[in-house]
Image (cartoon, rainbow, N blue to C red):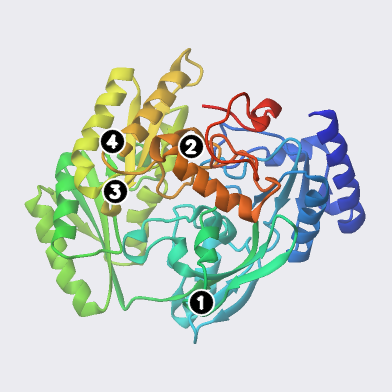
Amino acid sequence: MSGNASAALDVVIGELVDELGPERVITDRQRRRTYECDGLAAYRVIPGVVVLARGSDDVATAVRACARHSVPFVARGSGTGLSGGALPHSEGVLVVLSQMRSIRDADVDDQRAVVDPGVINLQLTAATSPDGYYFAPDPSSQSVCSIGGNVAENSGGAHCLKYGFTTNHVTGVDLVTPAGEQVEIGGKAPDPPGYDLLGALVGSEGTLGIVTSATVRLTRLPQEVRTLLAAFRSMDDAGAATSAIIAAGVIPAAIEMMDALAIEAAEAAVHCNYPAGAGAVLVVELDGPSPDVAGEFDDVVRLCEAAGSFEVRVAADDDERALIWKGRKSAFAAVGRISPDYIVQDGVIPRTALPLVLRQIAALGESAGVRVANVFHAGDGNLHPLVLFDGSVEGAVDRAEEVAGGILDLCLEHGGSITGEHGVGADKAKHMPRMFTADDLETMQAVRCAFDPEGIANPGKVFPTPRLCGEQPGRHRGAHPLAESGVAEVF
């Protein structure tokens, strides 16, 4: 830590202790280590100081102190992110929002809820389901991830095929700007006039400020839900079934696919009892009015069998439905049963490119001597390859990272994206120039600078080389000041 940065942080810590109290400001190094990473444990930074916020005023107090002394800050919710988006800053303040967990209002008549950022995703569904409603976005980590984090990363989930991502369910936020001001953007109305600032904020990964409450849509519980598991001999057959289902005009709530290696891991972890000998399985869920579900269900079964499914299982009740989903939703953690280490990748391709890209991923792994387990949202082409390796073996990490990067290259070659729902964060910033031109990136950073001219909100995330707000766009000679200071890395 440089002398000037250290002195500035010391001043901020003193102010925060005075205003919030020592019990809410963590300075002990061992306690700070609790927050050194999010769900992407490969990246670790011990934060300069940790603030445990209990309300929006606490957040504003922390951010104003940072703004006064040009000290960076990072927001953190449950810490379940998979892109290093909540990676702390060693010379900055980590604002932890996990204690802000109140559902302020659940207005089922207007189908809206106002929630604190630390409210757990599934907590909102549990609170509103007795009234016949739920919160539709459902990341696999929904039992532990927070809605503030969902807003920051624009999280998706298994049911995003039919119901969309978090951005489709947020109508307003309370925001603490990087200057420490508290502002309201949007509200319960579905489409407020003016610039779509809310659209810019959702998915901005904490680079435009800190959301201290969110107004979200509540969705009516469907009249009927039917879940089936279809087993196939190969990934190609399962991919063909997926394309046939969508082409037939059927839009299931979810179509999830797992390959043989992912099935093996899930069996070892949760004993989901998927059909023996399956090279791939599809989990298909249909919901809506009973007559519609019945007709669509018959179509899905017929199309799966026509594509080569050798066994179709239908969940008879909620317990069987939960067991089918348990295998899929445990897949990430489950690979720990078959591999000491793994990288969770996240990319998107056109759905019709699934068979070809999956074969190319297999070839990529085979040539590098690396196993890849595939688990993904087949309906919208959002891949989650799990690159398996043993970090104790010399060169294994490098080979795994090479395969992981190659998978993203494949996604881009086929007209896709480097991320579908995990975000860019610290992990994928270096890949952004592969997807966007220099002008694209300059335009995005101009938006960031409009919100955060001092560059203190979650610095070092999303963009490979953050530019100083106020500098002229375009090419420059010599080292960038942020690169010289170690904040930015040039790729």
* Disc 3 residue type (three-letter): Gly
Q: Residue at x 53, y 32 (%)?
A: 475
Residue depicted at x 21% and y 32%? 359
In the displayed structure image, the side of residue 17 where residue 281 appears, left or right? left
Mark 4 touches mark 3? (CB < 8 Å): no
**How packed is label 2: few (under 14 Cα within 10 Å), some, or many (20 or more)?**
many
Quick check: marks 3 and 1 in contact, CB under 8 Å? no
Identify the image quadrant of residue 9. Answer: top right
Quadrant hosting residue 315: bottom left
Outermost residue, left direction? 306
Which residue is under mark 1? 192
Q: Which residue is mark 2?
A: 428
Q: Earlier in the sequence, mark 1 or mark 2?
A: 1
Q: Nearer the viewer, mark 3 or mark 2?
A: 2
The amino acid pointed to by label 2 is: Lys
- Is residue 78 at least partly visible in the picture? no
The answer to whether residue 485 is seen in the rendering is yes
> How far from the left and from the top, in percent, is residue 350?
25, 47
Is 398 rendered above or below residue 69? Answer: above
Secondary element under disc 2, as helix, strand or loop, is: loop
Q: Position of residue 345 (x, y in %)?
A: 41, 37
Q: Which mark is residue 413?
A: 4
Q: Position of residue 181 (x, y in %)?
A: 74, 63
Q: Looking at the image, is mark 2 or mark 4 nearer the viewer?
A: 4
Vertical placement of residue 232 versus 199, above or below: above
